[in-house]
Image (spheres, grey):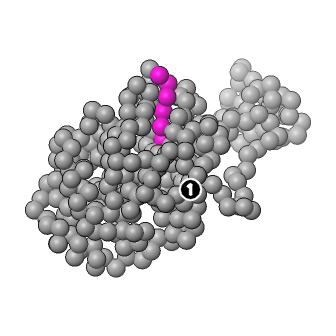
Amino acid sequence: MIFRQLFDPQSSTYTYLLGDAKRGEAVLIDPVFEQARRDGALIRELGLVLTATLETHVHADHVTGAWLLKRQFGSEIALSADSGATGADRQLAHGDRVPVGDRYLEVRATPGHTRGCVTYVLDDESVAFTGDCLLIRGSGRTDFQQGDPRAMYRSVRSQILTLPPACLLYPAHDYRGLTVTSVAEESRFNPRLGGDIGEADFVGYMNNLGLPHPKLIDIAVPANLRCGRPDQGDALPAEPTWAPLTFTFAGIWEIPPAALEEHAASVQIVDVRQSEEFEGPLGRIRGATLIPLS
């Protein structure tokens, strides 16, 4: 399997790329609107076909990149039938399977953070993507979007912590730089849901968190209920049209040499090498300005 964990620093959201190297097919879990260009670049560089984007739930802290990626790659949009969202190609239910080449992800309904939360479990139960239901040494909140602490407790205890102890758990967020945990770790060390913590204790704790609502909730939730499709009048990310540029996973726009030569008279070319390289035997592009990086 091909696996990548990607990060959006603005919302502290993890996006996951899961691919079948043999079949060349991949899915993205919880893509972010502002990172769709980055994700698309990675898919192209790995030579993969994006077959679907999967949401663990309707997010309140960022807008999904599902619609943008569908527009670019023709990928299906899939999320829980209980999410209330429109515009999805597939409405998922507990027990459904989402193909990833010759492998698959099993859908497990894990409501609590929202009514439409799901966890995706790899077919051999070695990996699960828990969304905002179970975080690393924590849990998602339950005080908006049909949140229910009793439902969350039962979801975690019956659908996630019953997986094999060695199963790796990847959440949708972490705010401390942590990246992965396991069923064994969370069963033992999660201060909210592990050990002998009872349902009543968990419910009492969650009902008294007193957290402010996410800053983008009034923008993100309506957009995500449309699967990320912009509202009428909303501007899409601008794409350069003056030359056949390619955006790379490294975050750099690349231009083919022939296109650069064609547009050389209308652009400023900057050479960032050292002066000895600029004047050296390898030569330089005619008209380039030397501005060394160091």
| 193 or 261, nearer to the observer | 193
Q: Is residue 119 visible?
A: no
Q: Which residue is mark 1?
A: 86
Residue 143 rendering spot, x and y as whole percentages: 37, 73
| 280 or 29, nearer to the observer | 29
Residue 77 rendering spot, x and y as whole percentages: 53, 45
Q: Residue at x 34, y 48 (%)?
A: 94
| 248 or 138, nearer to the observer | 138
Q: Which residues are magenta?
A: 23-28
Marker count (numbered)? 1
Q: Residue at x 44, y 27 (%)?
A: 101
Q: Is residue 89 left or right of residue 135?
A: right
**The residue tagged with tag 1: helix, strand or loop?**
loop
Q: Is residue 160 visible?
A: yes
Residue 49 rendering spot, x and y as whole percentages: 55, 30
Magenta-colored segment: predominant secondary structure = strand
| Rendered image quadrant of residue 89 | top right
Q: Residue at x 28, y 64 (%)?
A: 151
- The quadrant of the picture occupied by the N terminus is top left
Residue 63 rendering spot, x and y as whole percentages: 55, 58
